[in-house]
Amino acid sequence: MRSLRTIHVVSAHAEGEVGDVIVGGVAPPSGETLAAQRDWIERDGALRDFLLNEPRGGVFRHVNLLVPPKRPEAAMGFIIMEPADTPLMSGSNSICVATVLLDTGILPMTEPVTEFMLEAPGGLVAVRAECAGGKARSITVRNMPSFAAALGAALHVPGLGDLRVDIAFGGDSFLVVDATALGFRIEPSEAKALAELGVRITAAANEQIGFDHPGDADWRHISFCLFAGPLERERDTLTAKAAVAIRPGKIDRSPTGTALSARMALLHASGEMKAGERLIQRSILGSEFHGRIAGETEVAGRPAILPEITGRAWITGIHQHMLDPEDPWPRGYRLSDTWPGASGPSGSGAGR
């Protein structure tokens, strides 16, 4: 078979959300740090387009690139590519990466527990994997320090009205709205309406509020809208449904690890959670991530928590993505029937 390039991918999902892992065929991008390598991938766009665009990808797909770590403590580095973003951190993607590394034998597995460090663009990620029968059956990751940015902020959404919203950082920046107050039960039949409204709410929040990260002067945006369901408490454990709208307009199939971290930070700031307590977050599919406040810390003087996220991932296949030299869409294409706001082929050479 003719091919200008061949990229080797192990496909996986974490509690429903796709998080494929590139294991060969791509050289590490330029950059002295993983954050700089992430920036290069985002600016260049070619790898993102090739794997995320149709015909190889789709709005449902996330892809992670394995790279040599820059920090000596880490066993592996990874760079996350989502449909419209190249984030610093992702809970579901880190769980997919850890599972693929262990289940394929790229990193050695020790039963019953394997512990190691990953390096994401946002920093080091401690991993604890519960393993049995040659399978990583449960992955716990220590996320970035997470903090509340605003409680009860005023927001006007055109066509919807005035809302009170919370804003937090959980490895990424979130706007949190009350799902019940907006008439949602967070059920599969509501996915399209949640996705469309969530993107509208996020856009309005970026115009009116924005985000102030005390440790990163360049972080001025809100990435996602979290629709938070009502909380139930049993002793030291809270349970709630949640749905996260991801640009350009889809709902995370998993319970979203960074959103879970952000919500725990908000609950800690409002006095509803304390260190050592847990929050079980259920997705629109009914899958679960288990969160725990492992401790308290600060981010540039702002009170923050140390969140842990536990979930599962499964390998779904092994693929070799190729580019025929005569393919008229070498970087793929996006159409607005599944990619809201898309206009067609991407990048140079598209449509030759």
Image (tube, rainbow, N blue to C red):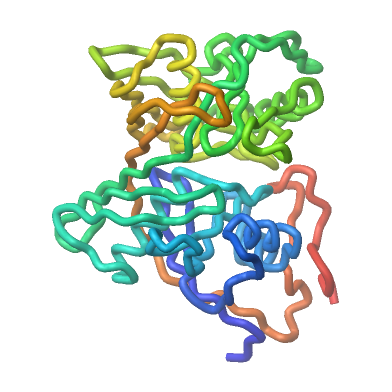
**Quarter-of-image position of residue 282:** top left
243 horizontally vs 192: left or right: left
269 up-or-down from 259: above or below: above
Q: Quadrant of the C terminus?
A: bottom right
Instruction: Identify which residue is drawn at 79% across, 16% down.
Output: 159
Residue situated in front as seen by the camera: 346 or 141: 141
122 up-or-down from 52: above or below: above
**Quarter-of-image position of residue 102:** bottom left
312 up-or-down from 69: above or below: above
Residue 187 makes an appearance in the image: no
Residue 261 makes an appearance in the image: yes
Residue situated in front as seen by the camera: 17 or 280: 280
Q: Position of residue 128 (x, y in %)?
A: 28, 48
283 horizontally vs 1: left or right: left
Q: Position of residue 165 (x, y in %)?
A: 63, 14
Instruction: Identify which residue is drawn at 56% across, 37% down.
Output: 251
Q: Quadrant of the N terminus?
A: bottom right
262 up-or-down from 20: above or below: above
Residue situated in front as seen by the camera: 127 or 18: 127
Instruction: Identify which residue is drawn at 56% across, 75% down.
Output: 321
141 horizontally vs 210: left or right: left
223 horizontally vs 78: left or right: right
Q: Position of residue 315 (x, y in %)?
A: 36, 60
Q: Position of residue 49 (x, y in %)?
A: 69, 63
